[in-house]
Image: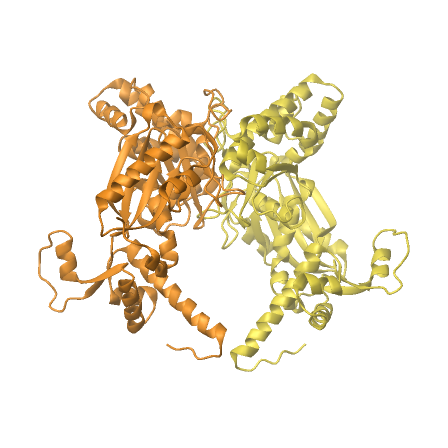
Chain colours: A yellow, B orange
Amino acid sequence: MAVTVTLSGAVSGTEELRRNNLRALLRAVHTGGPMTRAQLTRLLGLNRSTIGGLTTTLIDLGLVAEQTAAQSAAAGAAVGGTRSARPSHLVVPRPENAVIAIDLGVDRVQVALVGLGGIVLDRRVREHERGEHDVHRVVERVATMAGELIAAAGHGCRILGVAASVPGAIRSEDGMVQFAPNLGWHGEPFTQLLSERLGRPVRTGNDANLGVMAEHLRGAAVGRRHVIYLGVSVGIGGGFLVDGHLLSGASGYAGEVGHLHVDAAGPECSCGDQGCWELKVGENRLLTLAGRAAGSGPDGVDEVIAAAIAGEAVAQDALTEIASWTGVGLRSLINLFNPEMIVVGGTLAQVWPSIGDQVEEILSRRALLPPRADVAVLPARLGRDSSLIGAAELAFEAILEDPQSAVHCIAAS
Amino acid sequence: MAVTVTLSGAVSGTEELRRNNLRALLRAVHTGGPMTRAQLTRLLGLNRSTIGGLTTTLIDLGLVAEQTAAQSAAAGAAVGGTRSARPSHLVVPRPENAVIAIDLGVDRVQVALVGLGGIVLDRRVREHERGEHDVHRVVERVATMAGELIAAAGHGCRILGVAASVPGAIRSEDGMVQFAPNLGWHGEPFTQLLSERLGRPVRTGNDANLGVMAEHLRGAAVGRRHVIYLGVSVGIGGGFLVDGHLLSGASGYAGEVGHLHVDAAGPECSCGDQGCWELKVGENRLLTLAGRAAGSGPDGVDEVIAAAIAGEAVAQDALTEIASWTGVGLRSLINLFNPEMIVVGGTLAQVWPSIGDQVEEILSRRALLPPRADVAVLPARLGRDSSLIGAAELAFEAILEDPQSAVHCIAAS
């Protein structure tokens, strides 16, 4: 579609308005899912003909399709009941517009193909070789996994972007990993190396910041403005939404909640201090307390949970100990931030059905009453995928900001 | 610069623009001190005749005066050297436009008359009777002190507002003190009672939030956007500036940094938990560690400092212990918030010359390196007056928002 722009401000104003509307429509169906034109008209406050024009543009760009509700239902799951006599058209994001999302963990790395609309189309998960975190080997492994996914996706799919979640502090301008203590990384050019290896731009974000954004966009914290997300695995990452904005601090290092000092008599931490929170509630702490091998990951945690349910005392005691220290840390965060919601992810989401009641009881007894009354603590709705989905959202950001740029994206081969 | 468009919208737009400019000029001299018209022209990006018109309006409202630099110097301190042959006119805030600022502490209450420009004109300080915090008695005492100040100020002075700093969580819509553990207050209508007693509107803010705003406006943190202010006395109040905005949380209760859990083996706290930070570094902790009576306040602290300098081991050890726990808490805050600056106020500002180096050394050893490298820790430039000055700023807010409203203010009698 040709846009005739002459000189004046008014025309470029109109063009800017149109771009904003295009963005808003694409974001609406990407985040909110398929909608009828009538729903979009109401949601965006635009008239029907404007919505029609924008939809046509997005169809031409290959970003959305229009389906009748009947088609859509048939394409989805089996749907019973009567069909509308006059089928309404649904604007549906086309998931063959996909991104590569990488979740780089301490024990394992996950790479997924995520379609527009936020659907995980395919994924690969591998453990790091012998806990090896050499940045070149990690980059090679991630690139291989990404290549496999792209090859499997076939010709119809076009890759709109690549982004990674890393458990560390990321310099925003170039994605340099400034420090990631649990990977042993200090100033690693992971983003640049991966970008060179893939021959595509790569964006990198902190795992917990991506986690809180994902839960805010399509998880437990939709509509909330004061949110803490805790991604617990080997360490604890904290993502803080303060009045709707990500807490980043002076240089983007904010949120290092794993190194909250909770126990003056606690063990020494790799960070140089002692008694850090993550040493008291991290995944490997649970595993070793329960007499299991550190490093056995989510499967090991599932085994501890099952053992506790089956009545094994050592597993029950381990979970009680984790609950107790979880309460200690959450209490400080509630007193400090007065959040509406705390979303617990990773290991903590996994064990939440076992320890949630205990933690809630500790908070009611030990946090200050008024902020305690404000807060709901919930497991991540995206489960262990919060950071992965957050990385996908980061990768989609460019196309959501400028849907027209899709003309430059070519299908994968 | 006239804007000619049609009817109402455009005219009110011009009027709105004028009000904004009036506000900007008054704020500039209130916060920045006396300035020439030329300086104001540059600072506000307005032309000379606009600045002239605005200045005349503010003179008519009695809010500013114009003086030659010579008059101003003579009115100030003795100034030597040559005088400019062509004296430039200074726009000077008139401090006889004053507010009543109240700093309600746990041990004592302070009431001050603060003039436009932020100058403390007069003040009264009294200890609470026998540690008595009954809200009616506190209100009566504050009102008496305010009355004394107004009477002493005489006829030339007009009172533009009243505001109080309280060490607790304040409900923003009506100033209800939701909880102030160290005063034993839960849901006390202090603001409403004081307003009724004085026959004037009263605004109330949290002491540390007012402290961080005051240090940001005219103290150690001017120009900084990521700032933590710690007001230490019997408890610790925390005021957090996150990217230039006050951290308030879901209901305005954020910042309760005194109840950060730092020591699992620590003593029980009135908040219901144990091992809270304020029990490890509060004023009375220092005094009792040093073998002095709790409650002896700043004078007692001065005595401990002097004794340590004179070589008294128990006083030195007490300061070392305070330094150590100060480091523990600051470290968690640095890791969490990645601030540019931490401003320590109250007792901590008082002892900072004695313990600052020790604390800095602990931070360098135990905080995460990248956020540690970003942060400067400084004592409050406003000393023990940060919250008091913050309360004055809160009281000035209405006139700074609407300078025209000064016509409704009558001189005190």
Q: Nearer the viewer, residue A258 or B257?
A: B257
Specify whether B37 is left or right of A315: left
Residue A140, horizontal then vertical, whole percent: 62, 48
Residue B365 visible in rendering: no
Q: Nearer the viewer, residue A7 or B299?
A: B299
Count of picture labels = 0
* Relative height, residue A95 to residue A331 (above, below): below
Residue drawn where x is 66% and y is 59% of the image: A27
Residue drawn where x is 29% and y is 61% of the image: B61
Q: Quadrant of the C terminus of chain A?
A: bottom right
Residue A374, horizontal then vertical, whole percent: 58, 38
Residue drawn where x is 36% and y is 48% of the image: B395
Residue A48 visible in rendering: yes
Specify whether A54 is left or right of A16: right
Q: Nearer the viewer, residue A37 or A230?
A: A37
Residue A332, horizontal then vertical, whole percent: 51, 32
Res B355 quadrant in image: top left
* Relative height, residue B161 to residue A404 (above, below): above
* Relative height, residue A413 to residue B373 (above, below): below
Q: Residue furthest bottom?
A: A6
Residue A71, horizontal then vertical, whole percent: 85, 60
Residue drawn where x is 72% and y is 68% of the image: A55
Q: Quadrant of the N terminus of chain A?
A: bottom right
Res B124 quadrant in image: top left
